[in-house]
Image: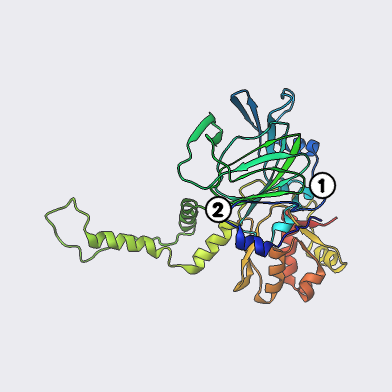
Amino acid sequence: MYQLTFSFDEFLAEFWQKKPTILKGGFKNFIDPISPDELAGLAMEEEIDSRYIAKLGSEWDVRHGPLTFDDVPEDNWSFIVQAVNHWHEGAARLVTPFRQLPNWLMDDLMISYSTPGGGVGPHIDQYDVFIIQGSGKRHWRVGPKKDDYEEEFGHPALRQIKGFDPIIDDILEPGDILYIPPGFPHDGYAIETSMSFSVGFRSPKKQELLSSFADYVIANEIGDVHYHNPDLPARNTPGAILDDEFNAMESMMRSLLDHPEAMKAWLGEHLSNSRHELDIIAAEPSWENVEVHQFLKSGEALKRLGGLRAFYYPEQPSVLFINGERYELPEECGAAAIELCDAEAITQAQVGEMIDHPAFIDLMTQMVNQGYWFPAE
């Protein structure tokens, strides 16, 4: 079990989305949760997002997965695998200590393997990231947040910048954690063959939210109302859009946001969608309600699928949003629903008498058969 050596409350107060920092020995006696061979195996899979990045003199070579490793140079290359917490249970345990942050902000665990000199060049990301140094050592530089960094086009697949004056310039050793808020340029390269584990937190954009909400409005036929103006005046300027007409249509658009229940339903569905593929394996054969009930009654645990996103609103916890879908339980099942979203595994001890509630068992059976929860080993 991985445990952080620092106070998360103190970290949030001093550093979160304020300034970068190195948390020396953030994990004690850190051991890589996945081997390079296992990571390479994931990079060879079609459904898993991976990249190979190499620097050849002044040129960059980038390949997108599925990867092969037949013709790689000796040094100066890396490969990166996204959302490893979706595919490798051991690696997923590395995310658990960071669940002191909201699950809806969590994006994924990205893992990179680098040979000496391997890196992706100086760049800027728009999300929060904790970079945990695994085996080996890596040199990191982080610069100040500014708006005028010049882009460099070393390769179309890499959004690099030309350089920066570092405010952090240090070597990370196993168990050290580098935290970088959005907008701070950074550059890291391996001093020796090494593994890096990046726990990333998403930062939704206004454009993304507006686009998603518009899709929800259309799909649910919200606001299917035409513009009407029975008091339309005659005019000598037919090419003009009058202020009253502009204001009326602006009000039509703004009124779409005046549906708090619809807004909450949309946001729950939107945030519970994963950006990356999930390792979903439907139960075969399907479970019956009685089997799920007996399984939990026997003291066994049902574990949530790695990367599965499950949320609720505290004022209405019996309504759940799981992997982009809405599910509703009776109000008396609210405490059990909270456990489903907050905990990484479900047991009889957590849900208490709700284990005998038909609606709760029916939902759990549905979740198991969809592959969202599965028997813990």
Query: What is the three-letter code of the residue carrying label 1?
Result: Ile
* Residue in view at x 66 percent, y 74 percent: 330
Picture coordinates of residue 222, whole percent (x, y): 44, 61
Q: Is residue 326 visible?
A: no
Question: Which residue lies under the disc numbered 2?
Answer: 203
Q: Quadrant of residue 7?
A: bottom right
Q: Quadrant of residue 265?
A: bottom right
Q: Which mark is residue 31?
A: 1
Q: Quadrant of residue 333?
A: bottom right
Q: Is residue 184 left or right of residue 132?
A: left
Task: Looking at the image, tell me whether mark 1 or mark 2 is earlier in sequence order.
Answer: 1
Q: Is residue 152 visible?
A: yes
Quadrant of the image for the N terminus? bottom right
Q: Which mark is residue 172?
A: none
Query: What is the three-letter code of the residue carrying label 2?
Result: Ser
The mark lying in front, picked from 1 and 2, is 1
* Mark 1 burial class by Cα count in 10 Å: few <14, some 14-19, many 20+: some
